[in-house]
Amino acid sequence: MFDGLIAFGHSIWSFCDPLSLGLILLSSLVGVIIGALPGLTATMGVALMTTLTIKMPSNQALLVLICTYVGAIYGGSRSAILLNIPGTPASAASCLDGHALAKQGHAGRAMGIATSGSVLGTLIGMFFLALFTPILGNLALKFGSYEFFWLALFGVIIAGTLTGNDPLKGWMAGLIGIFTATIGQEAIYAHDRFTFGSRDLAGGLQLVPALVGAFGFAELLMAVRERPAPVKINPFDSVIPKLRDVMQYWRTILRSGVIGTFIGILPGVGEDVAAWSSYAAAKRASKEPETFGKGSIDGLMAAETGDNACVPGAVIPVLTLAIPGSAPAAVLMAAMLIHGIRPGPMIMIENPTFVYDVVAMMMFATIGILIYGLTLTKVLIKVLMVPKPIILPIIFVLCVVGSYAISQRLFDVWVMMGFGVLGYALRRMHYPVAPLVLGMVLGDLMEKGFRRGLVLSDGDLMPFFTRPISAVLWITIVLVVMLKLPAVNRRLGRRTRPATPRVSSR
Amino acid sequence: MPAEIYPSSPRRDLVGGLLWTALGCVISVLSWQMDRMTQQGATLHTAPGLWPGIVGVLLAALGGVLMLRSWHRARRIGWDLAETDDTDYASLSSFALAAGMFFVYALLLVGRGLPFWLGTALFVTTFVFLFHYAMRKTAGKVARGFAVALACGGLTALIVTLLFEQLFYVRLP
């Protein structure tokens, strides 16, 4: 306990130099702006910043990425409240009550609630990050190849199940991601797979250009496909959070913080599910559920606390199991690997202070969003007014240069373009992209677990099913899949779709 | 019946299912044809094609399920019924122009002999000017629009080049 606190104190002190503090302020600002601009997401922001920080020392690079991540998830609330357009998918739930409050002339109060919810949500998540990571890290030491295989599969299945409207399409997107991870030389015999004689492909597809494509370029294509909405800002009052709002809704804050963190721990699920789940739980617990969607402070507080608590939560499985809890966390994990940090069960043995470094980074990111939450309103409104045709080509230049910068080869730019087109096509066909990313990130771990497991058992599949942790994991996977089968749902009398969707012929 | 209606129509899902099944089959066949490395002592469970083969079979199977589901749905609601899409789409020509410019920049202007800063300045200036042209023309401020586009292009090229070359020591294409 005290060792942990001392290590945390050391970590905080290690970032108290002018350069690190400057980086915290700059990257939090970049994160908030990226999050606030509709069409640019946290994943895209973290992916682009990964390419910009490639030459930095690892701790400073990760500090920048975590501040960008936390800032972007918070920044999304600004456009949700002011424009009724979620800056990131995580802020979609905040539109309902945030914009309703803005229309009633309380945009400033709504932004204050978003700031206090986000700050407290990140702090709650940070507490659980410090508490759970060592415990989960010790548990993960019991994991072998069999367990890692099931855990990686669980990640892809759960991401496919929860991140879109259609689990079948989610699972297929995950499989496509797993397939892309098989391209290049395999691990045992260095045999080229699906390379068609290309030397560039023999090294496999680099994760960061693929992620920049699937999230950056694909989102740019989506943005140019849509007509820009006219920007109309409602007048707003003071953005300073009111203590009364925090004290009155402490139960909502605690509940949403716990829900957000737990959803963050689930592999690949992410902040949008955390926000909606917290919102739904707050509505169920509220004495005035009829006010939700009409400017409920409870609802806005729940959504903002939930999505920001999810950020530290999503980092817990990255550190302990090398399994990302969300799409931006997947990019963060790729960045850790690029910087020579090996997340996973051994991290508490090989590099125990790193966990407390990450907790300290979260704390500084929280301070960053608090500062900008209180001061940045007018500047951010000016940024929101910048026309899309100016922002889009600049972001695209960064996508191209960022993809090129990692290995300085044009092939990575083509990979970025290819994954951009794939990501765009999947979005247009209503396939979720998060499982694709999880598949790409976890595909290698899954294959290694599968093949090593088979080698250890001399081809016998039984240990995959009979070892205790493996058994828990595969039974959970089967249950998750079964509960999504229409026949099972009919038997349980559950409805999986809204009863009366509006329809069109196309 | 309304609970059967999804964001994409059964016809779209059928096409998607067909594509994924075909891809899954191709992956499975290529995995089957892969060298099994028996000369190096590999067995069935260490053969390089085993894992991608399983992935290919699963993809083909799920593609088949998607096709079957779309066919079942089509029998009840018809092939083209889907949820209403509220998105306000831009014209296809403006989308094609923007996407085309992205591709021209990434595949032709970068790394083909043209200095990076020049290619970037050209791309950003042209993009900003073209996509603001209608608005500027209506306001009678085309020259001002060009000046703004030129400033955006020049500044982007300058800042990105300096940032990457001087600060991050990246040799730009």
Image (cartoon, grey):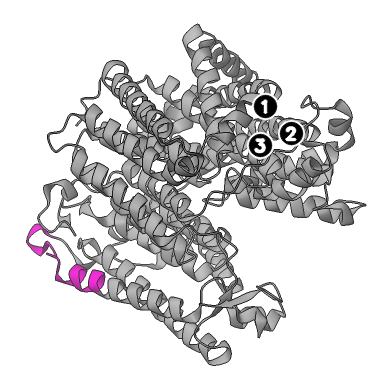
Dot 3 and dot 2 within a common chain: yes
- Which residue in the rendered view is the most extreme toward the bottom? B75
Query: In this view of the protein, can residue A321 be seen by the observer?
Result: no
The chain carrying label 2 is A
Callout 3–callout 2 Cβ contact below 8 Å: yes
Q: Amino acid at mark 3?
A: Arg
Dot 2 and dot 1 within a common chain: yes
Q: Is residue A246 left or right of residue B131?
A: right
The residue where tag 2 is placed is A111
Which is more N-terminal, label 2 or label 3?
3
| Numbered disc 1: secondary structure | helix
Residue span colored magenta: B26-41
Task: Report how far apart the C-alphas of labels 3 and 2 lie in the structure.
Answer: 7 Å
Q: Amino acid at mark 2?
A: Met
| Magenta stretch: includes residue A251 | no
Q: Quadrant of the N terminus of chain B?
A: bottom right
- Which residue in the rendered view is the most extreme toward the left? B39
